[in-house]
Image: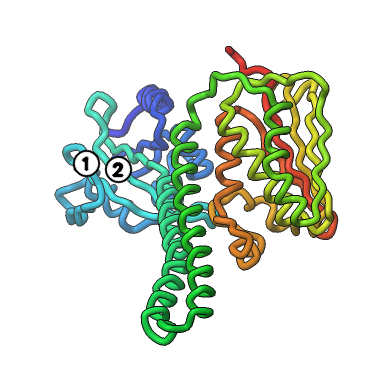
Amino acid sequence: MQPGTRQSDQIAQFLQTVPLAMLAVDLRARVIAANAAAEAMLGTVPIDRPFVTVLRHPAVNQALEWVLDPENHATPPADTQMPPPPPGGHALRATISIAGRDIPSDITVSPMPISMGEGALIAFADGSGIEQAGQMRRDFVANVSHELRTPLTALIGFIETLRGPARDDTAARERFLTIMETEAGRMNRLVGDLLSLSRVEAEERRRPTGKVDLNALLQGVADTLDRAAQAGGVRIEMTLPSQPVQVVGESDQLVQVFQNLVENAVKYGGSGGWVGITLDHVAHEPRLRGPGWSVTIQDRGEGIEALHLPRLTERFYRVDAHRSRNQGGTGLGLAIVKHIVNRHRGLLKIDSKKGQGSTFTVILPERHHGA
């Protein structure tokens, strides 16, 4: 028995209440309804057309044929990656191709409830986010392993040399111990940044509640880095309001943000001999839905090519990996900055052109909504 128009309308209304992409077919495997989530995922789904014209995937169509007519079709092989399907149904994990895009999906084909008529329901759970998260985790582990293996290999090599050929060579021993100290310091900084990143990510959804004077905080950051800047021939110039500037925030984390940005400007933009720190009021920032305070850190160094800018806050992404490592960078600093700024409901803007220096801007809300 095929569902009538009224029954098809009721099925369609039911599907719209389901958050997953889902469509319904009758006993002839012709589509009778699809919800908005299905059309967003699969494109326009034609009604009263064979399901195979919507999705040409052998395993999915085999499962549908079996669910609709189990007596005349072979049972599909069970997918051990999937939880048990409903009685009379089948669940599988498959990559479906839609408009040239491959989407890893968890798909469940189940008999239509008796109250809805005869046919089947096909539900799709888009697994792209899970797949992407898994890839990010694998990349992260690979990067950490690489970053730790390099200094560890150097340490092991120097230890073997000191125990062997350089055992009685005083000059070589001092040189090797200095290098070993540098490599151990790199590993220590990396572990410290990994722990810091982990803490920041864990707290990102929890808004800070303290009050911070940005004026005093920025002055403290500049004072801390002034000696290193002078040693590198860099002058730090401050442009701050004469009055205290209070924002909602966590002092230690904001110090970490601006210390990282100013330190980067001194290290990588120091060739211009100048780093500017400016604190300005923003009357209205649309993305913050209100007023804020803008901290701009600017240098006149070599600048960064446009192709690198979107990826600067990725973990371990470096414009110049060799130079960054020589400068003691771990490749995690800007990722930490991004997460701290997000926690403070602020914005991070990066503007740079090759040969024209770089500008990093952090805009923090003057007050949090609901605070």
Q: Quadrant of the N terminus?
A: top left
Query: Which amino acid type is shown beneath numbered disc 2?
Result: Thr
Q: Are marks 2 and 1 in contact (CB under 8 Å)?
A: yes
Q: Residue at x 41, y 23 (%)?
A: 13
Left or right of 192 in this view: 349? right
Can see residue 53? no
Left or right of 341 in this view: 245? right
Residue situated furthest bottom in the rendering: 165
Residue corresponding to mark 1: 85
> Is residue 16 positioned above or below 305 on the image?
above
Return the x and y of residue 165 as percentages of the image width and height. 42, 87
Measured Cα–Cα span from mark 2 to mark 1: 7 Å
Q: Residue at x 32, y 51 (%)?
A: 93
Return the x and y of residue 141 as percentages of the image width and height. 41, 57
Residue 94, quarter of picture: bottom left
| Front one among 361 and 137 | 361
| Front one among 80 and 108 | 80
Residue corresponding to mark 2: 108
Query: Which amino acid type is shown beneath numbered disc 1?
Result: Pro
Return the x and y of residue 203 as percentages of the image width and height. 47, 31
Residue 252, quarter of picture: top right
Q: Residue at x 73, y 26 (%)?
A: 215
